[in-house]
Amino acid sequence: MSHRVPDASYDMYAPWIDHFTHEVMDMPLSGQPESKQSFIPSKSEAAWVARRAEQIRRGLIQYTHKKEEKHSFYDLWANTERLRGIHNHMPAPKLKLPGHGQSYNPPTEYLPNDREPYRSLRKVPGYHFYIKERFERCLDLYIAPRKRVMRVKAESKDLIPVLPKPQDLRPFPTMLGHIFKGHRSIIRSISVHPQGKYLASGSDDHTVKIWEISTGRCLRSFDVEAAVKWVAWNPSSKLFLLAIVIENKVIFLNPETYLMDKLVVQQTNAVFREEPDQGDYIRPERVKTAVTWRKPTPDEWAKGYRIVLEHFRMVKQVVWHKQGDYFATLIPEGDHRSVMMHQLSRWRSQVPFNKCKGRVQALSFHPKYPFLYLATQTHIRVYNLQKQRMLKKVRANSRWVSSIAIHPGGEHFLVGGYDRKLNWFEMECTRTPHALRFHKGAIRGVAFHRKYPLFASASDEGRIIVSHGMVYDDWLKDPFLVPLKELRGHSRFEDLCVLDVTWHPYEPFLFTSGADATIRLWH
Amino acid sequence: MGSKRKKKGEAGEAKRYITRNAAVKKLQLSLRDFRRLCILKGIYPREPKNRRKAQKGDSTIKTLYYMKDIQFLFHEPIIWKFREHRAFSLKIKHAKAKKDRPKVQRMMQNKPMYRLDHIVRERYPTFTHALRDLDDPLTLCFLFSKLPQVQRTTLNMVNMCRRLTLEFMLYVIEAQALRKVFITIKGYYYQVEVMGQTITWITPHPFTPQTTTGVDFRIMRVFVEFYITLLGFTNFRLYHHLNLHYPPRLPHADIKEGSEDDIEMGDPERLASLNFPLKRNHVEDNESETIDTHLLEEDETRLQEAREEEKKKKQQQNLFKGLKFFLNRETNIESLTFVIRACKGEVSWEESTAEGNTFPVTDETITHEIVDRDNPKQPYLSRYYIQPQWVYDCINARLLLPVQDYFPGATLPPHLSPFDLDAHAYVPPEQKQLLARQRGEIPEDQLPRHQDSDSDSEEDEGSKKKKKTNDANIRPLDSFKSRTQKRKEKKRKLVQKEAAKEQEKESKPALTWEDVSREAEAMETQAAENGKDTATKENGKEEAAAEQNGKDAGMEEKCNREKEMRVYRGRVQKISPNAAEKQELEEKKLAIMMIPRKKKRVYHMLRRREKRKESGARRLTQKRIAIDHEKEKAKKAKKMEV
């Protein structure tokens, strides 16, 4: 604005005359009377006021604002009334506490090779991931699924059963006594003479050797035509006779030694010099085609052969009955004629079973009664030979049975398997055998001691385990089984190690034969 | 006819779980609100027994919540607050858009607010429950208390966290509840024992924590919101348990005439408040035995152990009683003050460093000055100048360790974890020494266990002086003496032996039965040889070793007998030195074979675990041996040079 007024006479600064003031003048400017409405209170306003008043009264409008405090603390746990919480709450696991390694100045061995220790507290920097770690913990707390996991807090040694000390269960073999050396190949079978003086062994090098136990000397050695599968002494005290198995033959040998009682030797020779009179006995066809008894040729007689028993197939095992007259042979591939019973005195044979289920693995006689134990691959069958009945059929708890041994008491038996299992059966309760997992290799042989509560098992891994097996007359009481000693010594040859175990008849001595062409005596 | 046919997904596992999306839909909340609700209420997903069944045939991994948990959330009044808040935010958005400022103002005043008291009460039915779960709250609150006050949203929280953590620390000081401290590369671990519950928390090193990518502060804030409420209530209860005012009345606050609660305490005030005792309602004398004796009555040994432990605890609580510490400004004053005061020590610092100092450097009664520099001036002979690690190590060891190792500039002994007490794991030699010291096998004022040539060279004059005075009493003099003594003894023995030999030659008649024994021995060895064969190489070796050993034993025996001026020949004993051990091992091996099959799996699992630990321990031992060997070598080389 240029502060210019178009009219020159106009006084811009003339004094102001206030015509319409707020002051009530004595004389009104206009003569119009006041409207009536201006004297009447507004109804709408009154309604509005009333509404507000009502609202205030009801506390809907608060003009004096009382702000509630977010944090005010009091004794929250004063009333002990229990509120409903989370169902089956699983508290979050606590953070792991740091070990020596996380120290700012750890022992030198905890330091990684490339890190220098902080030489003083002043030099420790801030941890870069601190917030990140806290954040991750927060995430874990609300987003990680929780699960109850049972943690075993025990120590391994708490689980080891407390067994009696082996020293308290003596005697048992603890160390190597003798090594019988002489064979040049695997020794498949050994047998201790019932009087406990001699040991016979049959090997793959086509020899049978007789050893003196007390000195470890080889008394005699017999060359035979083939590898010897089995040797077994006749248990009778009147005969000095060894049964050996070669291919399909069972040969009865009189290994005359100068140490043996001459009378017995002569008697044995005399018994077998003549063929027994068969009378009018006609051998059934089934037997005739399976077995032939014959006298040895003069050459063979000179070698010591007394009787030769030829079978129709390969023979695996010969088992003597305790009296020494009867014996059974096992022909694994003989189908229904795989088990045969023979009588030595009368040169008679018979096939006890019409049918034979499964491949028979091992045979054994009951030590007291005329029972025959027959182990197929997965089952053990017990027959009463007198009554010609099957007594029991037992599932072996093993996939492939290799050997069987009967406790001298007759109420228990041991079954070893190629699947590394060793099972102790009680005749009264064959359903639940005591599974003994002693071995890590296939079990080749098991044996009970005749007098002491001892048994031994040998396996391909080279260990022989001697155990204490006490049985009680009380049938309800479980046998008391304690492994006593682990024997090692035989070396391996072509995945084979220990092949046969036998006990001395009355001493706590153990004999083992091995693939390393040695026999060992443990005492 | 008959029962209704069962359908898949209508019962059992399928009904027991609900996926997250379904839960959100059911609760009619946004995902953010659902997450918030879950955090506040402490609801977490659960792992079903069978995922396929729980997810109605679907085998992809989904977040599954327990149906009962979601039903539990239905009744939560806070959900309505969330909804109110949503309505509020819409309204305020509207008002802001219309620029209706008075309305915005009014609405802001009436902003919907919720409290979490009932949730705390619900989640922790008793106070003990709350204490048991205090690890995470404390850790997170300590972190937030260290955050800069930048963001407006977190400002209030940060202040609250500062207040509450400080209060908790003050409580620990008052209750003398501190048990263990450990400095890691991550931060400081503190372990306290409050009303029988062990609580451990971590605080970062005294730097502003760095934020890294991938951290969502919104989630952390929700946690902190809940934790603040929880911590406030626990603090209240704890303070009242000790007959203390809550919020605490700090003496210096009166002086400064500041308002007592809601002081926005910065760091200086924080330190100041840590350094003063709190005002109590009235002091109670609770020196009575705190062990639950009637529970332990039957077991005398356990009672004894508990008493022992209690005694040690008392010792730890009064560890620094009567000691005066002065902290240099480069040390972590907050941590040190907290730790020392929790063990009844007195602390002060430079006036210029922070408020709250109680005595100046010139105070002659100061016993320890904590320094973290290489070459500090040490004008006072009346006090020890030590590095801060000493304080922490003393607390963990529950006794005052010799200060020599901790002089400024010295190579510090390793700082060991007080939490690493596994028997199967590796125990460093320092720990073994410490344990021996705790058992009282090493006298307290013994030599520094950690001697390095470089530490000697680096030491300052002042400390050297002190060391000399200390060393004069203890230094290797003893060991030197013993060494010389041993040497002398050896010489004496040699002389004796020679004399004995001469005597042997002269005295023929004495040898008669000795010859017999020699023969017998020869027989024995022969027998042994017979027994051994080529195949029993191992046995043979053993026996040979045994023989050797036996001979050695024989020699020793001989020496002993020579003193009695009699000459006998030692007999060969065929017992290998570790026969018993071997026997035991074998027995164990046999016993293991008798573990039932079901237990065997557990046994092998445990064994594997133990083996892993053992192998770790072995590795560490070997490394340690190598390091020590290296050190020794270096030392020798240095000596040679000299």
Image: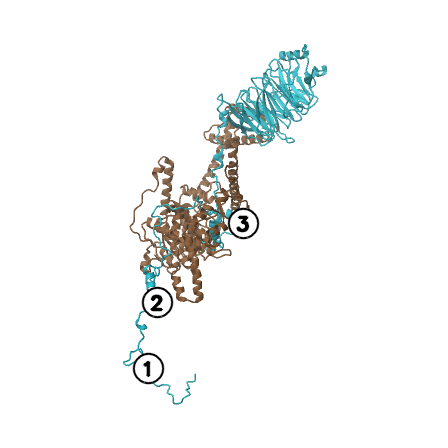
- Mark 1 chain: A
Q: Amino acid at mark 3?
A: Asn
Q: Position of residue A23 (x, y in %)?
A: 29, 78
Q: Amino acid at mark 2?
A: Ser
Q: Position of residue B510 (x, y in %)?
A: 50, 24
Residue B148: quarter of image: bottom left
Mark 2 or mark 1: name the one nearer the start of the chain.
1
Q: Which mark is residue A113?
A: 3
The reply to whether label 2 and label 3 mark residues of one chain is yes
Q: Which residue is mark 1?
A: A19
Q: Is B579 located above or below residue B221 in the figure?
A: above
Q: Amino acid at mark 1?
A: His
Image quarter where the N terminus of chain A lies is bottom left
Q: Position of residue B242 (x, y in %)?
A: 33, 49
Report how far apart the C-alphas of labels 2 and 1 lie in the structure. Answer: 34 Å
Report how far apart the C-alphas of labels 2 and 3 lie in the structure. Answer: 90 Å
Q: Which residue is mark 2?
A: A44
Circle 2 packing at 10 Å, graded few (<14), some (14-19), many (20+), is few
User: In terms of secondary structure, where does tag 2 sit?
Assistant: helix
- What colour has chain A? cyan
User: In terms of secondary structure, where does tag 1 sit?
Assistant: loop
Q: In front: A51, or B134? A: A51
- What colour has chain B? brown
